[in-house]
Image (cartoon, rainbow, N blue to C red):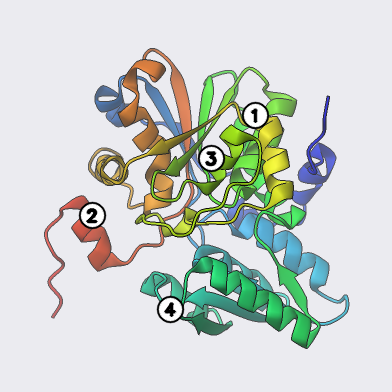
C-alpha cells in the first residue's frame, strides 16, 4: 500500500510538543442538530482556544523546531487563521513572525494577527498572491517559510485531531472535514485510515472554491482562475501536488456545497448548538443538508475548525439582528 508523507508515530509524538491548551478538544453528540439533519451528529470543537482554530496544533510544531535553531524568524501567507496561530506560537518562543495576507481578508483576523505581535504585510490580491510574496520574503531574508499543507508539521499537527477522534471510534461512521489547502483533511484522514479504517473520510469544499476537489476527482492538479465564496479559510486556487498525492490516499470522497447551504449550516450551529462559527467550519453540516439521504441513519462527526468571524458579516450571513453599538 502506498504511504502518505505523514507518520503516525511522529503524530503521536507531536502531542508532547503542542501546548495542551490546543489538545483534547471537546467531542460530543449534539442532539439538537439532529432533527434538522436526519442523522446522529457529533461535533469536534476546535474553537475554544486562544486562536479560535485548529491551526495552532501545526504552528506549535513549527515554532518548537525553530526555537533555538538558526534564524529566529519565520514568514507565512495566511487567510487569517494560520497567521494568528503562528503569531501565538512564535511569540511564546521568541520568534520574529511575519504574516502576509490579502488586503481583503477578514478584518477581525488581521487585527488579531497584529495584536499577537506579528508583523503584517498586506497585498492587493488574493491568497495565492500572498503565498508568492511570503516566498519572496523568505528568499530575500533567508528565513523559514511556513507553507500550510505542504509543510508536514501543519499536517501532522492537524492529525492529532485524528488521534482524538480515533479514540472515540466506532461510535461514528463518517467524518466530515473542511477542505482547503489540505492539511486538516490529509492529517485527520491519515490517522483515520491507520487507526479507524471503517470510518468514511469525506472532504467538503465550497462550490465557489473547488480546485482541490476537482483535483481529487481528476487525480491531477486542477487550478482555477478565481474563487467566489464566503469561506475564505478554504479559498485556494492552486493545490500543492504533494498534498494532493496524500489526499488521494486518505479521502473516500470530496463534495462541493453551495453558499446557501453554508449560511444555513452556520445558522443551525448558532441556533441549535450555540456555536458561532466561520463559514469554513460549517462545511460539514452543509454537506449533510445537501444530501440527507446519504447520511440518514448514520452517525457523523464534523470538525468545527474555526470561529474567527467579522461580526457584521456574520450577522448578515445568519440573518440575525444587527449589533447596536453605543
Numbered mark located on residue 166 in the image? 1
Q: Are marks 4 and 2 in contact (CB under 8 Å)?
A: no
Q: Are marks 1 and 3 in contact (CB under 8 Å)?
A: no
Q: Which residue is label 3 attached to?
A: 214
Ranked by sequence position, the earlier of labels 3 and 2 is 3
Ranked by sequence position, the earlier of labels 4 and 2 is 4
Between 220 and 206, the one nearer to me in the picture: 220
Q: For the residue labelled by badge 1, is the local secondary structure a helix, a strand or a loop?
A: helix
Q: For the residue labelled by badge 2, is the local secondary structure a helix, a strand or a loop?
A: helix
Q: Which residue is label 2 attached to?
A: 317
Numbered mark located on residue 103 in the image? 4
Tell us which disc is closer to us: 1 or 3. 3
Tell us which disc is closer to us: 4 or 2. 4
Disc 1/disc 2 C-alpha distance (Å): 33 Å
Instruction: Give the image location of residue 90, x and y in percent.
Output: 68, 74
Residue 282: which quarter of the image? top left
Disc 4/disc 1 C-alpha distance (Å): 39 Å
- Residue 224 to residue 251: above or below: below
Q: Are marks 3 and 2 in contact (CB under 8 Å)?
A: no
Amino acid at each position: 500500500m502506498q504511504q502518505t508523507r505523514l507518520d503516525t508515530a511522529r503524530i503521536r509524538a507531536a502531542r508532547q510538543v503542542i501546548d495542551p491548551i490546543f489538545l483534547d478538544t471537546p467531542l460530543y453528540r449534539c442532539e439538537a442538530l439532529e432533527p434538522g439533519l436526519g442523522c446522529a451528529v457529533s461535533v469536534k470543537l476546535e474553537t475554544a482556544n486562544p486562536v479560535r482554530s485548529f491551526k495552532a496544533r501545526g504552528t506549535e510544531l513549527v515554532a518548537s523546531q525553530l526555537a533555538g535553531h538558526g534564524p529566529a524568524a519565520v514568514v507565512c501567507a495566511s487567510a487569517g487563521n494560520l497567521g494568528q496561530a503562528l503569531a501565538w506560537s512564535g511569540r511564546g518562543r521568541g520568534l520574529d513572525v511575519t504574516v502576509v495576507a490579502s488586503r481583503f481578508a477578514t478584518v477581525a483576523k488581521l487585527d488579531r494577527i497584529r495584536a499577537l505581535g506579528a508583523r503584517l504585510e498586506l497585498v492587493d490580491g488574493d491568497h495565492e498572491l500572498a503565498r508568492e510574496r511570503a516566498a519572496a520574503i523568505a528568499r530575500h531574508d533567508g528565513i523559514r517559510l511556513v507553507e500550510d499543507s505542504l509543510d508536514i508539521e501543519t499536517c501532522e499537527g492537524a492529525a492529532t485531531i485524528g488521534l482524538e477522534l480515533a479514540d472515540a471510534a466506532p461510535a461514528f461512521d463518517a467524518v466530515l472535514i473542511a477542505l482547503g489547502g489540505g492539511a486538516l483533511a490529509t492529517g485527520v484522514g491519515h490517522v483515520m485510515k491507520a487507526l479507524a479504517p471503517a470510518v468514511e473520510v469525506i472532504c467538503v469544499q465550497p462550490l465557489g472554491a473547488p480546485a482541490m476537489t476537482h483535483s481529487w476527482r481528476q487525480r491531477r492538479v486542477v487550478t482555477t482562475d478565481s474563487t467566489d465564496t464566503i469561506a475564505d479559510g478554504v479559498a485556494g486556487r492552486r493545490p500543492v501536488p504533494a498534498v494532493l498525492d496524500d489526499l488521494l490516499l486518505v479521502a473516500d470522497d470530496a463534495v462541493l456545497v453551495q453558499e446557501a447551504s453554508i449560511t444555513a449550516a452556520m445558522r443551525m450551529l448558532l441556533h441549535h448548538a450555540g456555536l458561532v462559527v466561520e463559514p469554513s467550519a460549517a462545511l460539514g453540516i452543509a454537506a449533510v443538508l445537501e444530501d440527507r439521504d446519504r447520511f440518514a441513519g448514520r452517525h457523523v462527526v464534523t470538525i468545527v475548525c474555526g470561529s474567527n468571524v467579522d461580526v457584521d458579516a456574520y450577522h448578515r450571513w445568519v440573518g440575525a439582528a444587527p449589533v447596536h453599538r453605543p
